[in-house]
Image (cartoon, grey):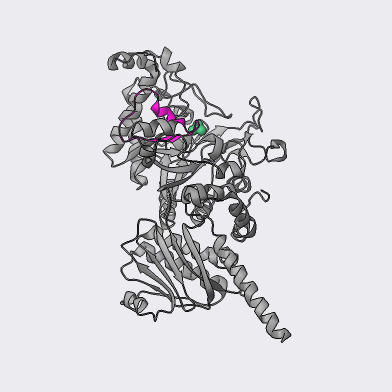
C-alpha cells in the first residue's frame, strides 16, 4: 500500500512538474492548455509534410539532430506522402510536422498526445517557433551540446496555439565601437531565435570604426576600421594607445546573413549617415566639409565632423556603399541612421551652403535650413535604395525637416518619434532609451555593475513597455514592433556583451510577442528563475543572475 501511495505521489509530482513547464514558456504562448499524460521521447520518428519548404524541413532536421545528440536516442526525419490522412485518421505516431495554409505568418499550433505530437505551421518561422516551444517543453539539457541521457525525455500532453503580437521583433548590435567576431554574432543570433526574435539590426559603421568591406572603397576597412587607441573607462581625456580594429569581409557578411536566415532572422544593416562618419572621413578626407585631416575617434560621443553633403562626390560614395550593402543583405530594409548629425560644419561650408541655396531651403519656425538639407540627403538615399527594392529605416531624427512617404522611423528618444510617425501614417519601431537601451546598467547601484553607460535599465522596466502608449487606436497598425539596442562603447568582451543582453532579452521577447493581456511580470520572473536561467546556463551564455 505504501508503495502504491508513493507511486501515486511520484506520478502526480511528475505531472505537476510538467504542468509547470507549459506555464514557463518564454515568451508566453497566446493559448496553452495542459492535458493529462505525457509522450515519452525515445528516438521518436519525426515526419515532415512534403509540402513544407526546404528551409522548414532543415529546421526540423536541426532539431532532430539536437534531440538525438542530447537524449542519446536517434531520431531521423522522413517526408512521407499522405501524412495529413494518417493524422486525420488518428493513427499518427511520433513527431509530425504539417503544412497548414490556413495559419498566419509565423503562427503555429502544437497538439501533443501520448502517442503523437502534431505541429502545424504555414511558413519557416511558424515551424521554427513551434520547435522553440517544443524545446522549452523538454528538459533544459536540450540546449546543451553534450548527451544528457539521465534526463527524463518526455513532452507533456497539451494544446498550444500561438502567434506573435508584432511582426518586427528586433535586437540591435553595435559592431562599430567594439568589434564582435562572426562566431560571437552567431551566438547572439542563436539566443535571439530561442526567444522568437526575427530582426537583427547590425550597426556596422560609426566614428570609431568602419566594419564592413566595401569593394569600391577599400580604404574604408584598410584605414577606417582601425583607431589609434580607446579611451579608458569613462575618462574622455584618456587613451590606452592600443591600436584597435576589425572588419567583416563580404564573405563573412554573407555567412552571417545565411546563418540568420536559417534562424528566421532578417538582418537589417545600418550605415549611419550623414553623421557618425568619422571613420569614413579618415579613409576618404575629400568626403568632409574641411577636407581633413581626420582621425577615427578614440573616444565616445558625437563628432561635429560629418559628411559634406554639398558635394556630388559624397552622393557617389553613398550610392556605391549602399549599392553594395543592398546586394549583400537580401532583407527588405536598409537602416540609414540619421541620428545625432551636428550641423556646425554645414553652417560654415561653402559647398553645403551652395546646396542649400540651390535647393531653395530656408529656416522656418520649425526647422533650420540645415535640418532640411539632412532631409534632402535622407530622401535621396531613400529614392536610391527604392531602385534596389529596399525600404529605409532611420532614427527618429529623420522626422526633423521633411520626411518621405514609406520611411520607417525608429523611435529612440522616447516614444515621441513613434507617436509622431504613426500620426503621419508612417511605420514605426519602438526602441526608447527608457525601456530598450541594453547598454545601461542592470542595477540602480551602477557602481556594483561592470563599467557601462552611466544609466540604469532594470529588467522590469523593459517588461513594462507599452508600445501603444500615446498612439491613437486607428494608428496602432503603424507600430510594427519593438527592438532592444546594445551599444558597445563600454563593452569589450563577449562575456560582458552577453551579460548586458541577458536576461533582459527574455523580458523584451514578451513585449514583442505577447498581447498586453497575456503579459504578467510575476509569472515571467517565476519562469525566468525556474526555467529561463537554466536555458541560458545550458546553452553556455553569461547572464546577470539576480532579478
Ligand atoms: C542613438 O542611440 N544614437 C540612436
Ligand atoms: Zn560641406
Residue drawn at x 44%, y 19% as measured from the top left: 343
Along the horizontal axis of the image, is 203 left or right of 403? right
Q: Which of 140 and 165 is in front in this view?
A: 165
Q: Is residue 145 shown to the viewer in this render?
A: no
Along the horizontal axis of the image, is 333 left or right of 484? left
Residue 202: image location, x then y, percent: 46, 42
Is residue 281 magenta-colored? no
Residue 141, compared with residue 233, is above or below; it is: below
Q: Which of 83 and 18 is in front in this view?
A: 18
| Quarter occupied by residue 84 | bottom left
Residue 386: image location, x then y, percent: 28, 38
Residue 335: image location, x then y, percent: 40, 37
Residue 508, compared with residue 84, is above or below; it is: above
Residue drawn at x 57%, y 41% as measured from the top left: 438
Q: Nearer the viewer, residue 252 or 199?
A: 199
Residue 112: image location, x then y, percent: 47, 72
Which quarter of the figure is the N terminus placed in? bottom right
Number of residue marks: 0
Q: Is residue 154 shown to the viewer in this render?
A: yes
Residue 106, compared with residue 207, is above or below; it is: below
Residue at the extreme left of the image, as rendered: 387
Is residue 409 magenta-colored? yes
What segment carries the magenta color? 396-416
Residue 346, compared with residue 179, is above or below; it is: above
Along the horizontal axis of the image, is 445 left or right of 484? right
Q: Nearer the viewer, residue 286 or 478?
A: 478
Amino acid at each position: 500500500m505504501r508503495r502504491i501511495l508513493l507511486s501515486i505521489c511520484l506520478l502526480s509530482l511528475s505531472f505537476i512538474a510538467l504542468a509547470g513547464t507549459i506555464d514557463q514558456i518564454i515568451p508566453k504562448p497566446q493559448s496553452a492548455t495542459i492535458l493529462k499524460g505525457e509522450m515519452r521521447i525515445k528516438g521518436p520518428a519525426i515526419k515532415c509534410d512534403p509540402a513544407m519548404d526546404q528551409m522548414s524541413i532543415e529546421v526540423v532536421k536541426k532539431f532532430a539532430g539536437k534531440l538525438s545528440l542530447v537524449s542519446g536516442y536517434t531520431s531521423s526525419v522522413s517526408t512521407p506522402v499522405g501524412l495529413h490522412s494518417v493524422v486525420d485518421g488518428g493513427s499518427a505516431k511520433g513527431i509530425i510536422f504539417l503544412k497548414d495554409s490556413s495559419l498566419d505568418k509565423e503562427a503555429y499550433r502544437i497538439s501533443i498526445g501520448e502517442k503523437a505530437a502534431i505541429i502545424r505551421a504555414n511558413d519557416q518561422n511558424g515551424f521554427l517557433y513551434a520547435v522553440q516551444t517544443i524545446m522549452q517543453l523538454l528538459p533544459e539539457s536540450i540546449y546543451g551540446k553534450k548527451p544528457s541521457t539521465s534526463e527524463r525525455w518526455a513532452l507533456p500532453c497539451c494544446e498550444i496555439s500561438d502567434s506573435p503580437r508584432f511582426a518586427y521583433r528586433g535586437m540591435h548590435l553595435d559592431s562599430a565601437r567594439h568589434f564582435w567576431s562572426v562566431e560571437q554574432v552567431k551566438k547572439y543570433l542563436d539566443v535571439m531565435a530561442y526567444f522568437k526574435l526575427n530582426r537583427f539590426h547590425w550597426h556596422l559603421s560609426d566614428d570609431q570604426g568602419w566594419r564592413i568591406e566595401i569593394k569600391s572603397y577599400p580604404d574604408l576597412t584598410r584605414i577606417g576600421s582601425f583607431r589609434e587607441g580607446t579611451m579608458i573607462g569613462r575618462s574622455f581625456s584618456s587613451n590606452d594607445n592600443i591600436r584597435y580594429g576589425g572588419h567583416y569581409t563580404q564573405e563573412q557578411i554573407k555567412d552571417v546573413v545565411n546563418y540568420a536566415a536559417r534562424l528566421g532572422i532578417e538582418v537589417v544593416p545600418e550605415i549611419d549617415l550623414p553623421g557618425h562618419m568619422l571613420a569614413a572621413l579618415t579613409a576618404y578626407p575629400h568626403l568632409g566639409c574641411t577636407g581633413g585631416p581626420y582621425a577615427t575617434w578614440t573616444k565616445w560621443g558625437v563628432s561635429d565632423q560629418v559628411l559634406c553633403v554639398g558635394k556630388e562626390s559624397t552622393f557617389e560614395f553613398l550610392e556605391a556603399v549602399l549599392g553594395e550593402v543592398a546586394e549583400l543583405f537580401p532583407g527588405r530594409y536598409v537602416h540609414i541612421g540619421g541620428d545625432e548629425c551636428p550641423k556646425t560644419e554645414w553652417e560654415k561650408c561653402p559647398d553645403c551652403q551652395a546646396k542649400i541655396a540651390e535647393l531653395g531651403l530656408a529656416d522656418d519656425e520649425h526647422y533650420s535650413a540645415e535640418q532640411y538639407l539632412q532631409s534632402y540627403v535622407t530622401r535621396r538615399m531613400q529614392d536610391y535604395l527604392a531602385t534596389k527594392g529596399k525600404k529605409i529605416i532611420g532614427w527618429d531624427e529623420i522626422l526633423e525637416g521633411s520626411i518621405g512617404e514609406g520611411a520607417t522611423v525608429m523611435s529612440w528618444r522616447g516614444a515621441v518619434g513613434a507617436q509622431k510617425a504613426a500620426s503621419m501614417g508612417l511605420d514605426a519601431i519602438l526602441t526608447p532609451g527608457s525601456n530598450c537601451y541594453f547598454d545601461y546598467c542592470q542595477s540602480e547601484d551602477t557602481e556594483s555593475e561592470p563599467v557601462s553607460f552611466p544609466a540604469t535599465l532594470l529588467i522590469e522596466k523593459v517588461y513594462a513597455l507599452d508600445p501603444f502608449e500615446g498612439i491613437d487606436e486607428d494608428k496602432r497598425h503603424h507600430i510594427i514592433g519593438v527592438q532592444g539596442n546594445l551599444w558597445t562603447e563600454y563593452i569589450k568582451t563577449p562575456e560582458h556583451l552577453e551579460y548586458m543582453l541577458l536576461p533582459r532579452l527574455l523580458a523584451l521577447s514578451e513585449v514583442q510577442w505577447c498581447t498586453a493581456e497575456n503579459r504578467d511580470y510575476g509569472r515571467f520572473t517565476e519562469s525566468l528563475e525556474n526555467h529561463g536561467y537554466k536555458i541560458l546556463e545550458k546553452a553556455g551564455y553569461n547572464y546577470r543572475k539576480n532579478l
